[in-house]
Image (cartoon, coloured by chain):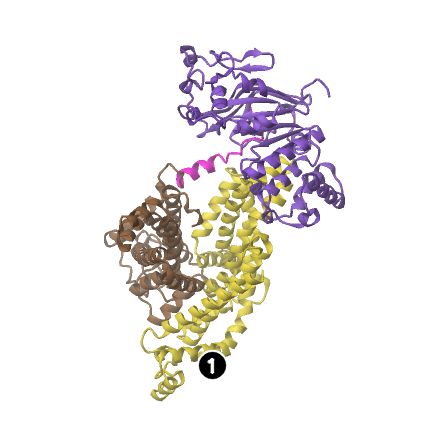
Amino acid sequence: MRRFIFRRLGYAVISLFLLSVTIFLLVRVTGDPTVLLVEPGASRADIEALRTELGLDRSLAVQYLGFVRDVLRGDFGRSFYYRTPVLELYLSRLPNSLILALTAMAFSLILGIPTGILAAVRVGGWWDSAGKVFSLLGLSMPSFWTGLLMILFFSVYLGWLPSSGAGSILHVLMPAFALGWYFAAAHMRLTRSSMLEVLGSEYVKLARLKGLPEALVIGKHAFKNALIPVLTLAGINLVLMINVAVVVETVFAWPGVGRLLYEGIAFRDFPVVQASVVLGGSMNVVVNVVVDILYAVIDPRIRYER
Amino acid sequence: MSDRPLLELDKLSTHYVTGRGTRTVKAVDEVSLTLRAGETLGIVGESGSGKTTLALSILRLLPTAAHIVSGSMHFEGEDLLAKSPGEMRRMRGKRIAMILQDPMASLNPLFTVGDQVAEPVRVHENVSRRSARERAGSLLRSVKIPAVTQRLKEYPHQMSGGMRQRIVGAIAISCEPGLLIADEPTTSLDVTIQAQYLKLLREIQRERGLALIFITHNLGIVAHMCDSVAVMYAGRVVESGPVRRIFNAPAHPYTRALVESIPRLGEGPERLTAIDGHPPDLISLPAGCAFHPRCPQVIDRCRIEAPDVVEVEPDHRARCWVMAPGPRSRS
Amino acid sequence: MSVNAPAPSRAGGLTVAWRMAAFRTEGVPMVPIAILVVLAFLAVFAEFVAPHNPEVGTLSLRFRPPAWITGGTTEYLLGTDHIGRDVLSRLIFGARVSMLVGFLAVLFAGFVGTVLGILAGYMGGWVDQVIMRVTDAWLALPALMFAIFLAAIVGPSEFNIVIILGLVYWTRYARVVRGEVLSLKERDFVRLAIVAGCSKWTIMRRHILPNVLNTAIVLATLMLGVVIVTEAALSFLGVGVPPPKPAWGLMLADGKKGLMAGYWWLTVFPGVCIVLMVLAANLLGDWLRVKLDPQLRQL
């Protein structure tokens, strides 16, 4: 088990390294990064100062090391717009994104898993067909459009829910639904196919041969096995949610890191954009490692792998 | 031991309906069998001959495309077809048990061995967790698994194939069933382990007076283990009777071919015979006797009419118009 | 007469409609193909089909509702936007943008991804390691975020979007194709070619590539939907196709301006178009996947 954890951590480190190199190089791909990294309207002198600070006259490797050192120190520069250190800004917004993502994830699992199970257990039936329609729609509707439609319906026509901002449960309902809708469809689909596979397995057959009541066969034997891939996907999706919530947060003016990224591009606030990408990508890597480890906890087969 | 047979199948037929109702496959076609308590019946046939479908029919655990369309089944005098799903479920594992071919796939990888062995007992006999665990322990001991307390806590993937098959065996006998159906239990085991396992099965059977249906394609095992044998071809029982008789004087040409194809030490390579032709396609069976395209003794009648059951001798039945005469010739 | 559990219930009308609209393994999925053909037609012949100029509007006619609602006219069938431009015409020209960007991006990503996937899978060794590590790292970045990042650096334009989307999505192809190649390598016809003395490049070109194409095509169709949604999201955020070009995502952004006032047609119609196109791509991709290679379930 310990070796397993070390190996996963090793991969994570390599991924983080490559991630940082990629971002670093991409920023410099246009030739002159000061174009991006300097405030709009800065004077010649400011640009020169930034040049020296970034060490643009030095070799790429040295610049990269400086970049990494800054990142590890938590120094992502200052936001042009807010005039505060970017990391501070990001961290202040992160909890909001987490709340949104967790709510959306909960919704997607509560909706997705039971419908998936029902669709599998009653294959070919009404529930299965309805489920297929639902999953297709969910996977085809862009989340921000779902959000816009919801605003139209619940804010403009019905006036029940607020259309922007955060602050109460009412505020989080629509964004969470809009964000979670797509993932609910994805989870439903995976639950269904995973469940179908498990229901056709030999150990489920044996469970029936043992004379176990159907509820036990499905609830105990089929369920846990079917759920493994779904939970893995859910774990990966959680961070994905945070990162792609950009559009939903923008639609609802939800003050999370997604909105921050939007502000970054709207206000040409590049340090914010860069930091969002670095931090977002890193979070993804970290969460993937955590999910892998959790997976090993649930599934004893992985634990004893070499 | 009463005179009444333990299991009686009378002209049982199970059909698969495929292609949205357009095609019917007669997986089991008018099969009649009798089994007494404590006896071992071997069911032999190629893959696709209907052996497994027959077993699942007895347990009424067929996939949704398959239905029992005619015939009757009686177990300990009770009509199995008349039972409700709930009653049938209570019989499974408790009065009739079954072992599947692949022990690795039969065990749920996420639960401990102890949990899975104790399950039938917990469900059928409503005992406490602790006594179920103790029962599981003694069951594992009776199938000769060492270090029982450790094993109970382990997971299936940590054990060898032979051990897993014993565990599956332990699960099967846990509620003291009267009938055990074993579907090719040794096919996925190493040859060296097979003999041990068969020996174990025989012991368990003798200790508990268990009736055993042994499904296999291996005639050698049948000769070893079984009291009587039923040979299946294309969903029908083409010959059935006591093991000795079938081996010494097979009546049906297919049985003859099977018996003769067992290689024997000491005889030269020219003795190796295979059966001509290829296995039947159940979707498009030939008219008349299903075996006639491959039969060395085929006559015209075989091509037109499927043979009825003929009693060669008491207890020895076969479906053939020709009926090979006398004992097997030796060169 | 069955003694088993009853057969699963039929859903009656829903099942029939489903089968007609979607697909079964034998039938060709008419509806998705029809949708895509219509969209392609609109894309090519936009100039002839659209009633108005999509980029120029009449300010006095802004925010007109669709024709069937009071206040609307048949001249502007689906209403007008905040600058008085005809929604229907913009939708039609938007089809061109979506189809072009979608297909080009998918082709680009597919080409790069397939080539690199084949190289990685077949050559193995350090080539494989390098390509795989880069793929992993790039996959760690969520597509949308990565796309936004790149757009922020190079600036938005139709051309850039295609490149950006290609750069973001090639990794999906590389991963899958590499897996295919790894198993193909063990197949006899490849081994025979090696024994016959063919060079690596010949083998990759003549033996591996054709066999991988099936997978690539299925993946491409499935990716089309994803790419279109990403493009719409980028345009919505303002870093995709720049105005005044009529991209559907851009129309949604404009539509938001009128949302609180209840000008629903500016939001509903572009969205419906996006959904239709993505739906068609998804259904077609699913069907292709079943048809071309049932082993591709992991996609």
Per the image, the residue denoted by label 1 is A83
Observer able to see residue B142: yes
Magenta span has C3?
yes
Q: Is residue C137 left or right of residue A163?
A: left
Q: In this view, does C132 lie above or below B53?
A: below
Residue C9, x across and y down, in percent: 53, 34
What tint does the image give chain B? purple
The one nearer the camera, C17 or B230, is B230
Give residue C210's position: percent from left, percent from top.
30, 48
Left of C45 or right of it: where is C236? right
Q: How crowded is mark 1: few (under 14 residues within 10 Å), some or many (20 or more)?
A: few
Q: In this view, does A245 lie to the left or right of B245?
A: left
- Quadrant of res B280: top left
What color was chain A assigned in the picture? Answer: yellow
Q: What is the magenta range?
A: C1-21
Q: In the rendered structure, which amino acid carries the disc numbered 1? A: Arg
* Quarter of the image with the N terminus of chain A in it: bottom right
Q: Residue furthest bottom?
A: A45
Residue at position x 37%, y 60% in the image: C125
In the image, the chain rendered in brown is C
Q: Residue at x 35, y 81 (%)?
A: A59
Quadrant, the C terminus of chain A: bottom right
Residue B101 x, y percent position in the rendering: 56, 36
- Residue A199, compared with residue B257, is above or below; it is below
Front one among C270 and C141: C141
